[in-house]
Amino acid sequence: MRRSILSDRRPAVITGVLLLVGLVAGLFSVVPVIDGADYLAKASTHENQVLIGALSQLLMVVAYVGTPIVLYPLLSKHHKGVALGSVAFGIIAGVFIIMGVIILLLLLTLSHEFSNLGASNGSYVQTLGGLLREGRDLVNHVATTLAFVLAMLLFNLIFHQTKIIPRWLSVLGLLGSTLSILASLLFMIRLIGLDASYMTLNVPIAIQQLVLAIWLILKGFNRTEAI
């Protein structure tokens, strides 16, 4: 009996840890020097900040891909197609994160090139840098966010149907996912920027992710409903 309980709790604890890793890595993946006005001049002098951001994004790959994979054996018992869709979106999110890392490192390379050329001779570097930074924003805040939030939407849908976590927590996840999708779409069509409106729309899903992680680590899934 004790072995069965530990076996049931293991996926919950792993999922909770992955969700926490995703949140923490997401915070450290922010690279203020790249988002600033003088990013080409300053990125090369703040290389450690850029590299920490890149490594943090790679940790996000583990979290974003790992979460739906760990949940799949449990969720597929209730709805195999939805669980598989969650895994697919998680993997897609991981691919987009890697693309974002590559763009970030290219921006660092451009910054070094800009420093060597000087501002007066680096107009083409500035043009290319602007395009890369725009592409990074779209990859990070539209493609990656949409993919992982869709993964969360799907597994929260199963959570809601099966009650393997408290219903209020799954409802918060469904609401937060919807608002986060809305934020990415509004950013994509330029109705909002990476401003307070964007951040506010993403707060509910971040809160749900944090609370869900703590709940799973401390309490696990409802074993009666998980069977």
Image (spheres, rainbow, N blue to C red):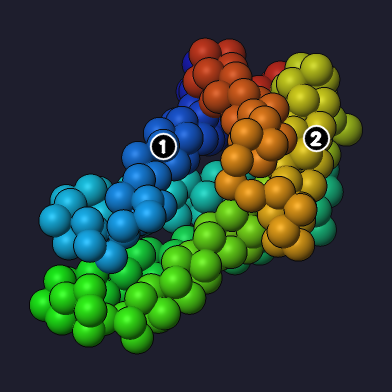
Secondary element under disc 2, as helix, strand or loop, is helix
Q: Nearer the viewer, residue 211 or 155?
A: 211
Rendered image quadrant of residue 206: top right
**Residue 128 place in picture, x, y as percent:** 40, 80
What is the secondary structure assignment of the residue under circle 1? helix
Mark 1 is surrounded, within 10 Å at the Cα level, by few (under 14), some (14 to 19) or many (20 or more) other residues, namely: few
x, y (%) of residue 141? 59, 54
Horizontal relation, residue 45 to residue 107: left or right = left
Q: Is residue 177 above or below residue 35?
A: above
In this figure, which residue is indicated by the disc labeled 2? Answer: 174
* Amino acid at circle 2: Leu
The residue singled out by tag 1 in the image is 27
Q: Is residue 155 visible?
A: no
The x, y position of residue 39, in whole percent, is 31, 59
In the foreground, 207 or 201: 201
Q: Quadrant of residue 125?
A: bottom left
**Image vertical order of residue 70 relative to residue 200, above or below:** below
Q: Residue at x 35, y 40 (%)?
A: 28
User: Badge 2, how many Cα within 10 Å: few under 14, some, many 20+?
Assistant: many
Foreground: disc 2 or disc 1:
1
Q: What's the residue at 23%, 48% (across, down)?
A: 49
Tell me residue 5's x, y (percent). Answer: 55, 20
Identified by mark 1, the residue type is Leu
User: Left or right of 19: which side holds 204?
Assistant: right
Taking the spot 78% from the left edge, 39% from the top edge, the residue there is 179
Quarter holding the N terminus is top right
Q: Earlier in the sequence, mark 2 or mark 1?
A: 1
Direction right: furthest residue = 161
